[in-house]
Image (cartoon, rainbow, N blue to C red):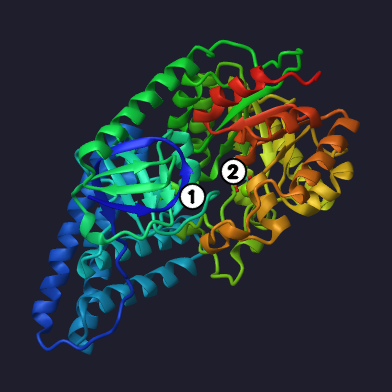
Amino acid sequence: MEVINGKSVFGGIAIGKIKVYEKRDATVKRSRVEDTQAEYARFETAKEEAKRQLQALYDKALKEVGEVNAQIFEVHQMMLDDLDFTESVENIITDQGVNAEYAVATTGDNMATIFEAMDDEYFRGRAADIKDISERVIRILLGCEADLAESDEPVILVADDLAPSETVQLDKSKILAFVTRHGSTSSHTAILARTMNIPALIGVDYDAAVDGVMGAVDGYTGQFYIEPEGDTLTALKEKREEDRRKAELLRELKGEDNVTVDGKRIDIFANIGTVEDVSIVLDNDAGGIGLFRSEFLYLNADDFPTEEEQFQAYKKVLEVMAGKKVVIRTLDIGADKQVDYFNLDKEDNPALGYRAIRICLTDHEIFKTQLRAIYRASRYGQAAIMFPMITSVKEVRKIKEIVAEVQAELRASDVPFKEDVELGIMIETPAAAVISDLLAKEVDFFSVGTNDLSQYTLAIDRQNDKLEPFFDRHHPAVLRLIETACENAHKEGIWIGICGELGADVALTEQFLRMGIDELSVSPSMVLKVREKVRSLDLSK
Ligand code: PEP
Ligand code: MG
């Protein structure tokens, strides 16, 4: 038995087989080959394997998300057989006497450049597909495929780090816990663990040889056990049982009010990333959805989700929530949430860069497509729209202009929608908190994104695990900014919630209630814990 110490980002006990996910270096180098025929044959074998993988993805998508969404995998298979593609690879290998990886990468880049320069929007969109199929073949040639999704039994997933684009591919029913070498408390892997209610550790210096052996994660102590045995294993199993009992007790709070002993009420909503998360929200009896991170619809796709695809997703969430409020946040791509087909430039400071509302206010078509989808879906429940990364009144006014355009266009085409959808903004930059008196005059609600608000206020990159020792989660600067926003919201008669991770920190629940925060939107698994805390407080004392 071996024990490795890490840092817990979510509690709980998991016992099961370890699966190490290794991202091997997929950088392509140019090298000379003697036998070009054999090299081309190597390409053909990799191409066939890529087609096999795509067929498997097609079959899975057909079952889970339907024909329309599955079609892309069929198109990719056809593109792999396209003569322009294969002949270009063959010519580069034979004319230049180089390796297949280099030939595929060059072909992919050249064809993508040609597509990107076309006038027709459909063909421009194919550039991302060409890149995608080239990368798949290259990964196979280099022997560094992502095998995240494939596992027969539930596993403890161990990785260097996990990007949001990787976690969206996971079959969540197969994950018992996350263990990563890097990552931070407010990283998206940590948020995902909280949503799934499974333990997660970061800062664990593991050895890749643990792949396939039995392991255990103690999300309370931050310990990762390799081949736990004897008394340790028995104690871990008892702790896991104890957790189950506590969860049962918490479930007795289902249906109860979020009210303090002296009668102060607060809304407790939940945060979601995907349509599938809604069932966990209902299971935990949340009063609504306070943050639907819509960018996961984009992260989960090979190309921009169409208006229709988005409309179906929002409609489904609204219908299942049956009249309860659903706050849909417009896309928050950029920083740690990267999507290839957005073709964003590499930036030195992505968290301070071209992201979220800045993309939407630059590329109105992306923004309007999403807004149209939300407005069309608004008839099916109680939708609200929230805009991320706001720093100025000017941005909010511009957003409202674009919203008005979208509404006018829908009206002109006789598309029904609700006129009174609430519009709110995230308070997640210090600038927004400081001018919250001005912003409160412009919108219907605020929701404080404490993950980014802490990052920007304390100058602590939320992705950088080295900064953990400097990160004071309860820093008075952040709490004062929340209080300022709360006072200013109420002066203008609008509501204010907290949807960042701090909202679920029960050590602060009393302070938030005393400030007058109206809503806390937390990971679904935290709803009942926060309710328990609220019901234990007496603010009259
Ligand atoms: C936040 O910043 O607190 C937030 C809720 O948004 P995200 O974590 O998605 O950036
Ligand atoms: Mg944020």
Q: Residue furthest front?
A: 231
Point out the tag, 1 or 2, that comes first from the N-terminus.
1
Q: Is residue 500 visible?
A: no
Q: Is residue 232 left or right of residue 118?
A: left
Answer yes or no: disc 2 within 8 Å of ligand 1: no
Q: Quick one: SS at disc 2?
A: helix
Q: Is residue 113 above or below residue 6?
A: below
SS type, badge 1: loop
Distance, label 1 to label 2, CA atoms, is 10 Å
Q: Are marks 1 and 2 in contact (CB under 8 Å)?
A: yes
Per the image, the residue denoted by label 2 is: 369
Which amino acid lies under the numbered mark 2 shown in the image of this protein? Thr
Of the pair 69 and 332, the residue shown nearer to us: 332
* Quadrant location, the C terminus: top right
Report the disc number at residue 304.
1
- Image side of residue 52 versus residue 514, left or right: left
Q: Residue at x 24, y 54 (%)?
A: 77
Percent from the top left, x then y, of residue 177?
A: 35, 41
Number of callouts in the render?
A: 2
Can you say whether 418 is above or below 503 in the image? above
Q: Nearer the viewer, residue 143 or 158?
A: 158
Residue 15 in the image: x percent, y percent?
28, 38
**x%, y% of residue 360?**
65, 52
Amino acid carrying mark 1 in the image: Phe
How many neighbours does mark 1 have within 10 angstroms: few (below 14), some (14-19), or many (20 or more)? some
As displayed, is residue 118 above or below residue 457?
A: below
450 and 123: which one is in front? 450
Side of 506 relative to 394 (left or right): left
